[in-house]
Image (tube, rainbow, N blue to C red):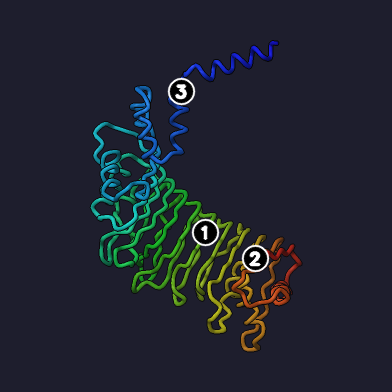
């Protein structure tokens, strides 16, 4: 009997028409709205007087042009909510993405807004209507509040735009750069990251060196995680001056010149080589020799193993693999595009580890 009464009371509560969502505190509602696209969060203002100005308390904005029916509507919305806004507002993070080409003046205004409001987290993905030699706005790299920056920018000619020679960003912890170029800081060497004193995670994705620059020096005593994706040309050189590095991922065409300081804290290495149709150059063993003393967890793709296999079968290029003295785990991803058979992968792994204590080996076959 009591159960039936409770059920009837529950049904009355559900059917009384009361807006229970609106009864929640502002902080809870704003937290929910944080996970919405900003366009949709603003639309809640039409629900009732309770919601009319609630969106103005948002501190995290997501502005993507694909959410709008036209680029002109998107620009109007960005101007209204961000650039031309009259009353003071707080902005902690901005995720801005625009398809098509954006005017460089418009980008300057967005970055100026970011700098004025001391944004902490910033993601920008744009194509610019500029020709070659366009340098990204310097005030972006002087922002003293940024802790996270993800930046992808290309010009109208599909060439990359320039980063400043040295990045300021004193409290930046995570940096992801895509489609930008680095200019020599001194001589023929670019050294852009040495002044980012709190940088912990760095991703360099499809980046390059400007003409006359042949060396990318990654110098940072705080950096612990480094990812290099499809960056630089084979003739270029990478120097690692990162004594606290613990994780290194390289997915790239062969960069034949890689040097590194002592890496006593290095634990995890992930190497994916893009092509195997190259001269028999033992660059891969140069990489592994630099990393062998300390690495504990290593991941290789089957294309990387194919390069090692090719080198091991030619007397002119056959070299002794390094000793991986601390290696505990080797993981190999076997992909369909690899010419090596399963037996070939196993024999190449055995060749690679012949001078090492036997770690745990896992081969993940994606060819079946």
Q: Nearer the viewer, mark 2 or mark 1?
A: 2
Counting residues from the N terminus, which is met first, the one under dot 3 or under dot 1? 3
Counting residues from the N terminus, which is met first, the one under dot 2 or under dot 1? 1
Horizontal side of 105 relative to 58 (left or right) equals left
User: Does residue 33 show up?
Assistant: yes
Seen from the viewer's position, the closer of residues 299 and 96 is 96
Seen from the viewer's position, the closer of residues 240 and 270 is 270
- The residues tagged by marks 2 and 1 sit, at their Cα atoms, a distance apart of 26 Å
- Counting from the top left corner in percent of width and height, residue 110 is at 29, 47
In the image, what residue occupies the spot 32% across and 33% down? Answer: 89
- Counting from the top left corner in percent of width and height, residue 262 is at 57, 64
SS at badge 3:
loop
Name which quarter of the figure residue 176 lies in.
Answer: bottom left
Q: Residue 25 — which label?
A: 3
Residue 206 higher or lower than 7, as above or below = below
Q: Are marks 2 and 1 in contact (CB under 8 Å)?
A: no
**Mark 3 Cα within 10 Å, few/some/many (few <14, many 20+)?**
few
Q: Residue 226 — which label?
A: 1
Q: Quadrant of the N terminus?
A: top right
SS at badge 2:
loop
Residue 164 higher or lower than 149, as above or below = below
Q: Report the residue marked by disc 2.
A: 366
Horizontal side of 274 relative to 332 (left or right) equals left
- The residues tagged by marks 3 and 1 sit, at their Cα atoms, a distance apart of 42 Å
**Mark 2 Cα within 10 Å, few/some/many (few <14, many 20+)?**
few
- Counting from the top left corner in percent of width and height, residue 345 is at 69, 74
Counting residues from the N terminus, which is met first, the one under dot 3 or under dot 2? 3
In the image, what residue occupies the spot 43% across and 46% down? Answer: 147
């Amino acid at each position: 009997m009591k159960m039936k009464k409770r059920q009837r009371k529950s049904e009355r509560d559900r059917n009384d028409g009361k807006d229970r969502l609106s009864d929640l505190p502002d902080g809870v509602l704003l937290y929910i709205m944080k996970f919405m696209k900003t366009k949709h969060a603003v639309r809640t203002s039409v629900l009732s007087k309770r919601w009319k100005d609630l969106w103005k308390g948002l501190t995290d904005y997501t502005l993507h042009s694909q959410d709008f029916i036209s680029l002109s509507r998107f620009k109007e919305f960005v101007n209204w909510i961000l650039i031309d806004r009259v009353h003071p507002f707080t902005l902690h993070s901005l995720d801005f993405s625009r398809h098509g080409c954006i005017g460089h003046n418009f980008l300057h205004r967005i970055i100026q807004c970011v700098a004025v409001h001391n944004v902490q987290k910033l993601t920008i993905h744009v194509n610019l209507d500029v020709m070659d030699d366009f340098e990204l706005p310097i005030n972006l790299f002087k922002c003293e509040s940024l802790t996270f920056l993800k930046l992808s920018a290309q010009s109208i000619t599909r060439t990359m735009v320039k980063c400043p020679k040295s990045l300021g960003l004193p409290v930046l912890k995570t940096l992801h750069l895509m489609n930008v170029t680095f200019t020599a800081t001194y001589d023929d060497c670019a050294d852009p990251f040495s002044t980012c004193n709190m940088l912990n995670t760095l991703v360099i994705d499809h980046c390059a060196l400007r003409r006359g620059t042949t060396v990318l020096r990654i110098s940072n005593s705080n950096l612990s995680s480094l990812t290099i994706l499809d960056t630089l040309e084979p003739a270029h050189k990478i120097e690692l001056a990162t004594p606290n590095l613990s994780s290194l991922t390289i997915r790239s065409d062969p960069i034949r010149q890689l040097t590194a300081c002592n890496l006593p804290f290095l634990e995890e290495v992930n190497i994916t080589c893009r092509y195997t149709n190259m001269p028999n150059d033992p660059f891969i063993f140069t990489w592994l020799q630099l990393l062998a003393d300390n690495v504990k967890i290593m991941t290789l793709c089957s294309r990387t193993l194919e390069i090692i296999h090719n080198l091991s079968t030619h007397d002119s290029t056959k070299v002794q693999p390094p000793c991986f003295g601390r290696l505990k785990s080797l993981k190999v991803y076997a992909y369909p595009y690899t010419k090596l058979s399963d037996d070939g992968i196993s024999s190449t792994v055995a060749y690679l580890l012949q001078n090492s204590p036997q770690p745990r080996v896992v081969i993940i076959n994606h060819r079946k």
